[in-house]
Amino acid sequence: MANYKEKKGFHVQSLSGDPVASSIAAASWASGGAMNRGNNISAVGAGASNTAAIAAGGKTGGPPYAESNKTEKYNGTSWTEVNTLTAARENAAGTPNSPDSSMLYFGGTPPGTGVDLTESWNGTSWSEVSELTTPKGSTSGAGVSNTSALNFAGESPEGGGSGPHSARTEKWNGSSWTETGDLNTGRREAAGTGTQTAALCIGGSEDPPPTINKVEEFNGTGWTEIAELNTARNEAASSGIVTSALAYGGRVPSKTAVTEHYDGTSWTEVADLSTARSDTSAGGGTSTSTIMAGGETSTAYTSATEEWTAPSDFSKMNLGQVYFNSSPTNAFKLTQLKTPTGTWSSGGSMNTQGYALFSLGTQTAAMRAGGYGGPPVGYQANAETYNGSTWSAVAALPVARNNEAGAGSGTTTAALVYGGTAPPGRTGITEEWNSSSWTESGDLNTVRNQLAGVGTQTATLAFGGQSGPGPSGYSNSSESYNGTGWTATPSMNSARGGIVGIGQTSTAALGATGYGPGPSPALVEQWDGTSWAEVAEVNTARDNPGGRGGTSTNGIIAAGSGPRTVNCELWNGTSWTEIANVATARYGPGGQGASSNAVVLFGGNSAASDPAGVTATEEFSVPTANYTITVS
């Protein structure tokens, strides 16, 4: 009889190295030709790749040191001195993504001042053009030519960190500068990249703090805060566009070689520079072909050049693939997601603070409604949706309330909210969301707050909560919604409030943690569509957690109270394991995720002394990685 291999065939690809997620993940830095001078600050790279760039200005010599007017041109192999700037200066900015035949250089300092001088490079020489409207030093820029540029951040006047930090932003149209929307956070020594209408302002200094990880994106009119760098820094270099950018080098405050890539959503650390350095804006090119030149190491100015290249031919990582790594490990491997390796990172902040709020959806399509904002805000009716980076207000609830169903029942276009506290007391009101407005539907059979829920708009399970005052007021009631009304289902084994629900359907759920007259706040029960059964308890007892996601056999919870905690735990269907903590301990946050590998957490109350709640959002993400297959 033929075996499986003879009938179906069998093939495992043999690779000389592990596959990678993208060309960026396979990219690396390599040495290029050295500059003719060691220098720091404002050797502004310009070019569409790492084979053509211009570097100008900065500081050389030393001691004593002096501002420089020298310009050098790079051809991919060596640097050649060309015509000088009309005025020597440092701490200037330019257009890091323009070709070496057309760039702009603006602002800067002799020491203790900020200058408004702008110079244009035509491929052969520099010429003075119209000045900035505000003199600046330690400033930043973006742009693709000497006719299209953006200036932002800096000091005015520049004073070595003591000058006023600027949020002012100006556009260059080829003949003059015009003020446009300001940054949200004034700063100096930030990295800049992109175009005049789509730019990034990366890191910098607020003094204090001396380094920040804040990143803002410009859309042609105004700035929006987006995902933060993993490593806070100033005086870094950058290149690329708003959907694929690099930030590299800088001070943290020591010199760093760390390189990070932004994919339009989040920052990921990739291959480091060979030489840790700061004080250079000499980035340029794209996220796949970049240059960094000059700067300051821990001991001296440097003339070193490094080229970043992403290969066009590489083995792409595919989830679920099995392969043989022939070098260097000689091992069979599997590409997979492992939740314990996940980490939390900052997302876009909500527009309105709040806690004890209703939430649903996924990491990239979430919703919050209602909640409590502390005095004088009080009970909230406002609702917002999240697209993975920013929150947008939508139609408010007809009835302001908090402590309504604590987890998702639906999507951002078809949702259900029910129960909660709406003055003067608990409510059973149920409302349906159709992507534009709310409509009241059938009330809960058991009026309560601090309850949990799972499912969809037309197939929901609600359970637990508090239906009255005192120990006897905690509820173990469970009921299901069919799109019109509620029907009682078998009750939980233990009554409790401040409970959280995990699951995607009304027939498979976890009811985790909470408080009541008897059960431990670590208690967990599992619903199989027919009855509830106690399963393994969480490691950290708590109530009102958030960041829940996944299913009844593979779920996650984070934060909570009793006291407030940063603890995050993973459920594998049998037991709970502590994994990466959230950044902010908080009580009553919202949060949801269709998978335990991609969860969002938002809002909550971070301290008893701050009853208003927070707007902070955090996202839990798990990288796709290659793991050795072991046999035991």
Image (cartoon, helix red, strand yellow):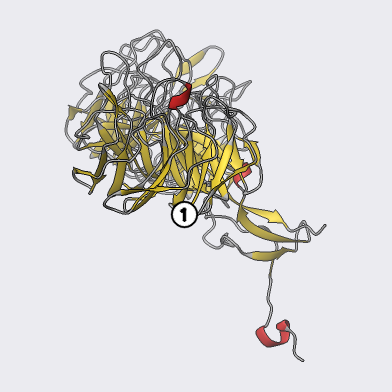
Q: Position of residue 93 (x, y in %)?
A: 36, 28
Q: Is residue 102 visible?
A: no
Going by the numbered disc 1, the residue's amino acid type is Thr
Residue beneath label 1, please?
507
Of 370 and 322, the residue lying toward us = 370
Q: Is residue 191 visible?
A: yes
In this rendering, the answer to whether 76 lies above or below 321 is: above
Of 55 and 220, the residue lying toward us = 220
Quadrant hosting residue 320 = bottom right
Tell me the element at label 1: loop
Please indicate whether residue 153 sits to the left or right of residue 182 in the image: right
Q: Position of residue 278 (x, y in %)?
A: 53, 26
Quadrant hosting residue 242 = top left
Of 298 and 243, the residue lying toward us = 243
In this rendering, the answer to whether 592 lies above or below 56 is: below
In this rendering, the answer to whether 136 lies above or below 146 is: above
Q: Residue at x 52, y 55 (%)?
A: 22
Q: Residue at x 68, y 59 (%)?
A: 17
